[in-house]
Image (cartoon, helix red, strand yellow):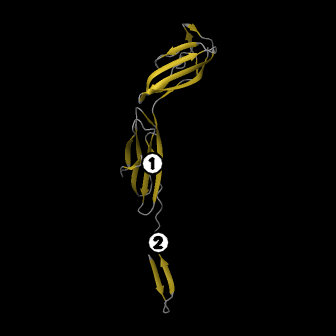
Amino acid sequence: MVNIQTDHNGCDSIVTAHLTIQPTPLAAMALSHYYLTEDRLWTTVTDTTSQPHSRRWLINGVFTDTVKSLRCHADLLDDSMRIVLVVCNGVCCDTLGLTIPVQHGFVMFPNVFTPVAEDVNARFCPRGSGVERFELRVFNRQGLEVFHSRSMEDCWDGTCKGVPCPQGSYVYIVRYTLHYSPERWLSSSGSVLLLR
């Protein structure tokens, strides 16, 4: 509110101003999952902004809803999902955006194993998710193949044709396809240390 008073000569003499200042809201959100997988293509987002406000959610660029908590779904072929929260207090607005990656599938290997052990590292076993087809080859230092498998369930026990392989470093090459793209072969290689 602004009051302006003028004197008898028409000049301004007193100015009184009453301002109401609203704090700018600071957008905040929480997620149930910070990455998505083939088996779980959703996350729940919750507005955790502390000041009173109105909200809008944008999922992949589309305004969706104004609820406090929302379950968002990605498409299997998406590489990521973009979630944006817009909060407003009637005067000022703030925006917070996050990109959630979609992990379509993966294969990983340990870097060391001990065949004489009685634990999880007793065999060279792949771990992964979303794999459709799979092929693993293991080679010794001379380049001779010591193990070959077409199944993620087959683990190398550190032998070649029933004979224990010597302690040392071995190279592996893996090829695989994922459920969402069964015709596209992916490959990677690495080394593993066999300890006896």
| Pick the front one: 141 or 12 | 141
Work out which quarter of the rendered image holds the N terminus and state it: bottom left
Q: Do the residues labelled 1 and 2 touch (CB within 8 Å)?
A: no
Q: Would residue 27 be seen by someone viewing this image from the given angle?
A: no
| Pick the front one: 138 or 119 | 138
What residue appears at the point 45 percent right and 80 percent down from the top-left corner? 3
Q: How many numbered marks have been drawn onto this rendered protein structure? A: 2
Name the mark on residue 29.
1
Q: Within the image, what quadrant is residue 146 found in?
A: top right
Q: Is mark 2 on a helix, strand or loop?
A: loop
Q: What residue type is labelled 2?
A: Leu
Name the mark on residue 143.
none
Q: Would residue 70 be seen by someone viewing this image from the given angle?
A: yes
192 left or right, relative to 40: right
What residue appears at the point 64 percent right and 13 percent down from the top-left corner? 142
| Pick the front one: 34 or 76 | 76
Q: Where is residue 117 in the image (x, y as percent from the top left)?
A: 56, 15
Q: Where is residue 167 in the image (x, y as percent from the top left)?
A: 63, 14
Disc 2: which residue:
19
Q: Which amino acid does label 1 sit on?
A: Met
Q: Is residue 137 above or below residue 19?
A: above
Q: Is residue 8 above or below residue 154?
A: below
What residue appears at the point 52 percent right and 25 percent down from the top-left corner? 187
Q: Is residue 172 above or below residue 95?
A: above
Q: What element carries label 1?
A: strand
Q: How far apart are marks 1 and 2 (CA)?
A: 31 Å
Work out which quarter of the rendered image holds the C terminus and state it: top right
